[in-house]
Image (tube, helix red, strand yellow):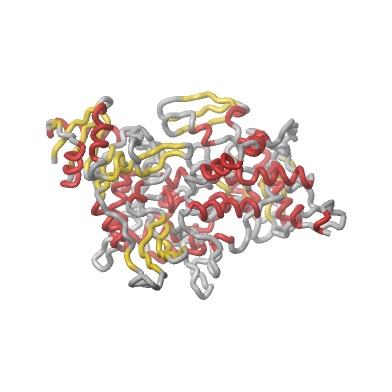
Amino acid sequence: MKFITIDKKDWAKGIDKSRRTYQLFGPVKDENGCKIKELDTGLVPDMDYHESVMSAKSVLFPQSETLLTASLNESVEDHHIMKRAENAYTPRAVLGIRPYDAKAILLVKMNFDTKDYRDPYWCDAYEATTLVGLGITRPGPFDFSTSVGCGPFCEDGLDILMADLDDHYLAKVLTPKGEAYAVACGFDAAADDKESQALFDILRKEAEKNIASSVETDKLKEKVLLDLHEAPFWDEVAFSCINCGTCTYVCPTCWCFDIQDETKQKESSRFRNWDTCMSPLFTRHATGHNPRGVKVQRVRQRFMHKLKYFLDKYDQGIMCVGCGRCVKSCPVNIDIREVCQTMNTYEKKD
Amino acid sequence: MDTCIKKIRALAADLLDKGEVERVIGFAKGTIPMATSPIAIGSKQEIEKLVFNSTCGLNLANFATKQKGKIAIIAKGCDSRNIVTHIVENQIKRDQIYIIGVPCNGMVDKFKIAALFKDEITQFEEAGDTLTVSSVSQTQTLSKQDVLRENCRLCTHRNPVLYDVLAAELVEEQVLENPFPDVDRIEALDSDAKWEHFENLTKNCIRCYACKNACPLCYCPTCFVDEAGPQWVGKGQNKTDVDTFHFLRAFHCAGRCTDCGACVEACPMGINVRDFTRKLNKDALELFGWEAGLDLTKRPPLDAYSPQDPNDFIK
């Protein structure tokens, strides 16, 4: 572990230098708010953004991603044989990622990189990616990250964690990947480790104090799964839901996808798209039967997956990092904090 | 408008008390500033949950269908027009719905307000036309008129067109010299610039379908975007597919859209989805003298045949 200081005057120059070996991603603001996007040459990340509508999950898990391709041209060797798409997994760095988004990547990893299954697309992208985080000094009103095992200066999943100190960044290099990135930028002004850590601790405590929002999850584990599943409150939770995909798409930990085939002239491709458990099509069988055919079943699924199934399966907390994006973006203001509270305190009546 | 909530609660309590309706559909206070949530109240004890303010921007007609028994519903001008549309299109029967009409002074544009602040909004209060909005670092006093949603600014049906009871005095309707200045601006562009305008509009669309799902007109059992056998439209982020969704959705609303703004209200990306439907509304008015949802006895123009049709080709 070591700390370095980066003068803000050198920041743009440094990251520009890293472009020789890294493809860069970062927060970009336009008329539709802030998204984490690829930073084309000349584009610097908007480090002052206070929220991004979309999380950083798209860097490893794009909304649409080609998996396999095949040529239908019969004069070509191997025609009609699907082969892995030639996606480049050259080094990439995500700049200014918020700690909760990095933590979310670790939760997503539990799904894409298991003992039994390894999603090569996600894992290869993960291997190639360096996450350069920026601690949150002024948490927003929707941030409840500290109560779900994350926080404004959480280091989980990050390769570098930076703190904004007006005219410079103080950066804590956490992994060899982070070290390599700092070298690629030419950032090498060492700072005193002990003093810097003390400063980080103060900043973290200050920021955590400013988080006013929280959830209680302590009793979820002991709840009987079917009791929660059959609980009477779901109709009320689901009434206002319009079954759009907003909550799942803005969520940094939602990982579900749908696979599609498309053919254009003599080229065929198989790709995946983000899918949402809110959509009836998500579970509709080829027979026409739909095990989650009505809205309340779909709404229940989302919360049960995040707050109960995931917890029961991995015993690593809930599948939520407390970024608050779904709370803010839900068109009908369904609030996961309230649902979590309802589930956590639910007692089955005999 | 801020005082009408007492009247709304009293009316709703009375209806539930007398057993005249099973449930009252209205708005509940949100858990975050500038948010409200559609709610169905089934008992008098829950009546305090009902609120009404300038952030009730969704259209409750969207929640009125497929309900058991008779319901009461809080209806702004636009909600009432969509209830009329629902009745005309056989989505709900007139005698199944009790309409508590709320004359409306317009809803606020949350994106417009958010853009006035450097950080996130933590508090929102309104008293008449005065809004007091705070973020962590600052408080601003705003005039509601300055931050109205565009569709409310151009609304000429603020009073409910169909109701059983009113929760407040009728308000004066706006008389506009030009109800479609936004459409005129786009019409004035050359075709390349027009295309660019619409391409730009959808560039950040995430296809969450909040716009169509918030729209009371979108009640098809299976939307064309969800048709799977055969599939009608590509499901990826290919621009052509994204645009196809928006264009087709808009055309399906032609002559039926009440410009309630629920699509814009729901969009998490702040896309002005109305840009797709407004020209069709203008055409409906100019070509058919038609505004949707004003008359229980008339079907929408694209849904009706008349031997008196002025166009020769159709006869």
Task: Find the residue positioned furthest to the front.
Answer: A75
In the image, is A221 to the left or to the right of A7? right
Q: Is residue A143 left or right of residue B185?
A: left
- Looking at the picture, how far across and down is residue A80, in whole percent? 38, 72
Q: Is residue A34 above or below residue A307?
A: above
Q: Between B130 and B258, which is closer to the camera in this rendering?
A: B258
Report the residue at 25% width, 45% height from top. Answer: A22
Left or right: B159 with respect to A291?
Answer: right
Q: Is residue A230 visible?
A: no
For image coordinates 17% across by 39% down, the residue present is: A183
Observer-nearest residue: B208 or A301? B208
Q: State the image coordinates of residue B207 (x, y, percent, origin top left).
A: 50, 52
Q: Nearer the viewer, residue A153 or A128?
A: A128
Looking at the rendering, in which quadrant would you find the N terminus of chain B? top right
Residue at 45 percent of width and 51 percent of height? A247
Residue B252 visible in the displayed image: yes
| Relative image position of residue B315 (x, y in whole percent) | 84, 59
The x, y position of residue A209, in whole percent, is 31, 34
Q: Is residue A345 above or below residue B50?
A: below
